[in-house]
Amino acid sequence: NSLPKTNLEELLLEVVSSCQDVIFDCEWKGVPYNCCEGFKPIFTENGFCYSFNSKHSMNNFIGAGRNYEREDFELHLIYETDQKWSIVIDMNSVEENNVRVYIHDADEIPSVDMAPQHIWKRRIKQIFFSSKQTYTTKEVKQLSIKQRHCVFPDEIKLETDSIYTYSACMVECRMKEARRLCGCVPFFYKHIDGFTYCDLKGLGCIAKNKKILQKGLNCPCELSCMNTVYEVEKLTEGVGVEDEPLEIGFVSWPMVRYKREILFGWVDLLVSFGGIAGLFLGFSLLSGVEIIYYFTMRACCMVYRNKDELLQL
């Protein structure tokens, strides 16, 4: 009875650990780095997290507002000439509270659809991953979304994000279903007009429908046509040092990039049919035009030229 029925987000922010109490002794590209300049708090469907290089993180720990998309967001970039392509962190109470490590694109919203690439228990000291990007040429837009199985970033307007991503689409789908079932959405979602945050009673309703919201939905979401996948390639075990930090970085340079394009379009199909018809029937596109000309324009011209003779008849 002593718990507040509303403003549950503010209550959570008062009890969670601050960045200074959790993350320390950071290095970025081989140089000592202020951890809390890069790691920002973020509410996710998986809980309260600290995220590096995410445009959806909050600017400050307290009173940041819940618009998520930070106007001052600036990517931390890695270049081929850098001394290291990694970040090193250390954290408190890792043995008691194992750390879930998610590696994803800066535009993606961490969600229950994502599985952690690693659960850190201090047995591993290095996580090296590869990046595989798929981009799609503009010519593919002539196909429907159902045919190409991907969505261009500016093709579908979402309420949860300014550009389309698969995770943002799934989050919006779950928000709409939560509103339909319970009349509200959990407070860890982005604030959107028309979506009311749940009080304690509403959260009870969300808990009852947890299985439906997490795995029982059939959301019409496709991958983005500009998609990046991160895969762990190498895990290096520690040497028995209990307080050894964790290094996370790229395994190699450069990254792999795939291209999605149309190899055989309507023009190619027309040319192929024309070639087959010419090979077996002696027919060409020019022959088809001549047939149309013979029965239309030529006939009209002959009638006009011989109209006097036709009148005499």
Image (cartoon, rainbow, N blue to C red):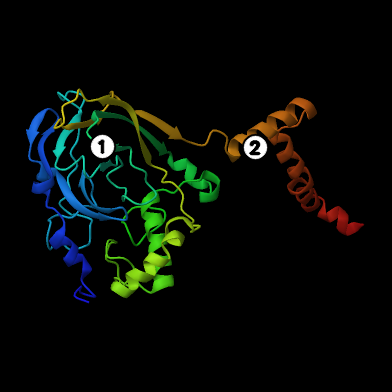
* Residue sitting at x 74%, y 44%: 292
Q: Identify whether 219 is placed above or below 103.
A: below
Tell me which numbered mark, 2 or 1, is placed earlier along the sequence: 1
Residue hosting label 1: 120
Which quadrant is the C terminus positioned in? bottom right
**Residue 34 in picture, x, y percent from top left:** 7, 40
SS at badge 2: helix
User: Mark 2 touching mark 1, by CB under 8 A?
Assistant: no
Q: Would residue 255 be visible to someone looking at this image?
A: no
**Residue 114 in picture, x, y percent from top left:** 37, 46
Q: Left or right: where does residue 177 sit relative to residue 161?
A: right
Q: Amino acid at mark 2?
A: Leu
Specify the quadrant of the image occupied by residue 282.
top right
Q: Left or right: where does residue 165 sit relative to residue 53?
A: right
* Residue sitting at x 23%, y 74%: 6
Q: Identify whether 55 is placed above or below 267.
A: below
Q: Identify whether 5 is placed above or below 239.
A: below
Q: How many other residues sit within 10 Å of disc 2, few (<14), some (14-19) or many (≥20)?
A: few
Q: Nearer the viewer, mark 2 or mark 1?
A: 1
Specify the quadrant of the image occupied by residue 176.
bottom left
Q: How many other residues sit within 10 Å of disc 1, few (<14), some (14-19) or many (≥20)?
A: some
Q: Amino acid at mark 1?
A: Trp
* Residue sitting at x 73%, y 35%: 287
SS at badge 1: strand
Q: Left or right: where does residue 213 sit relative to residue 88?
A: right
From the viewer's side, name the closer residue of 193 and 262: 193
From the viewer's side, name the closer residue of 270 and 72: 72
Q: CA distance from mark 2 to mark 1?
A: 57 Å
Q: Left or right: where does residue 42 sit relative to residue 132?
A: left
Residue hosting label 2: 270
Q: Identify whether 26 is placed above or below 67.
A: above
**Residue 283 in picture, x, y percent from top left:** 75, 31
